[in-house]
Image (cartoon, helix red, strand yellow):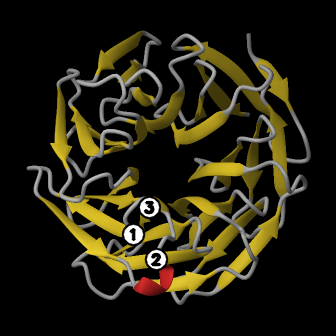
Amino acid sequence: MPHPQSSSGPRVTLTGVPVSDGEAGPYGIATGPDGALWFTKVHEGSVGRVSPRGGVSSYPLASADSGPTVIVAGPGDGALWFTEYKGHRIGRIAADGTVDSFALPTPQCGPYGIAAGGDGAVWFTEMNTDRIGRITTDGEVIEFLLPPTVAGGYPSAIAAGPDGERMWFTLNLANAVGSIRTDGSDIEIHPLPTPDAGPVGITAGPDGAMWFVEIGAGQIGRIDADGGIREFPLPDRTSRPHALVTGGDGALWFTEWGANRVGRITADGSRIDEYAIPSPASEPHGIALGADGALWVAMETGSLARVGIA
């Protein structure tokens, strides 16, 4: 049943869509080139799909223990790409459900974040080995070691910059945001002002800057092309924001994993609104802009949430 909510911001309607049992763990979510919603089930070792008409499908991976995490539409190849955190592989699933999986050169690397780059390749983070990886649509992999100053920094999420020439990534334990040119050169590291902020999700904003969440500090951050950083504290600093995306309304929308809410911040940072998810303790993680103009959230307890904006 839809649950309308309103605050000082836009009126929204939250609707739950069950997609698995409570053990499968929907985690990452993306809109595919086919207009469907694709999501990972981290505990089940599978990828799910919700068609534009609402039909739910599931595609098992070769290993139930591979830990598929973040998923993203590929760079024009008509497929979805995802990380297998526990399997230490990069996966690809075609629109017909055909799955390919690519081993990575560095053992036990723990790939997590993934994004399509402006160079026609797919980029990913390796949380366990201080590396940023690049894989072509043919499966060729190259890895780039980060500077020793951020050793053990836990590179987490990654996203393409608005210029298409750089990839931006968060360093969760190094308390920094970094970037790398798509030719693998010129790695830059930008420390955050707030200690132990724990940045995770990152995305390109509508204002030409990169936006990210600080799960440890309960803040939303913004970094411009020159490395200038602004931070915006959330009303609940213990809400543990996790992922974010630019919405169709030109604002940034984010999940609050620790508070069971979805949040919104305007692109000038002047207003933050929060919306409670009706189902208790739903563990909201990934968030994506759907083909229908709504925001969609993957909730680890077995559902997706549709956030319709009035």
Which quadrant of the view contains residue 168? bottom left
Q: Which mark is residue 60?
A: none
Identified at 53% across, 90% down, the residue is 226
- Nearer to the camera, 219 or 203: 219
Say above or below: 255 vs 225.
Answer: above
- Mark 1 and mark 2 lie on one chain; the one further toward the N terminus is 1
Q: Which mark is residue 151?
A: 2
- Mark 3 and mark 2 lie on one chain; the one further toward the N terminus is 2
- Mark 1 and mark 3 lie on one chain; the one further toward the N terminus is 1
Say above or below: 81 vs 123.
Answer: above
Q: Position of residue 104 (x, y in %)?
A: 20, 53
Q: Tell me whether the residue at label 1 lies in contact with that at label 2, contact meaning CB atoms closer than 8 angstroms.
A: yes
Say above or below: 232 vs 297.
Answer: below
Q: Which residue is mark 3?
A: 158
CA gap between label 1 and label 3 equals 13 Å
- Circle 2 residues within 10 Å: few <14, some 14–19, many ≥20: some
CA gap between label 3 and label 2 equals 17 Å
Q: Which residue is mark 1?
A: 130
Q: Position of residue 84 (x, y in %)?
A: 34, 40
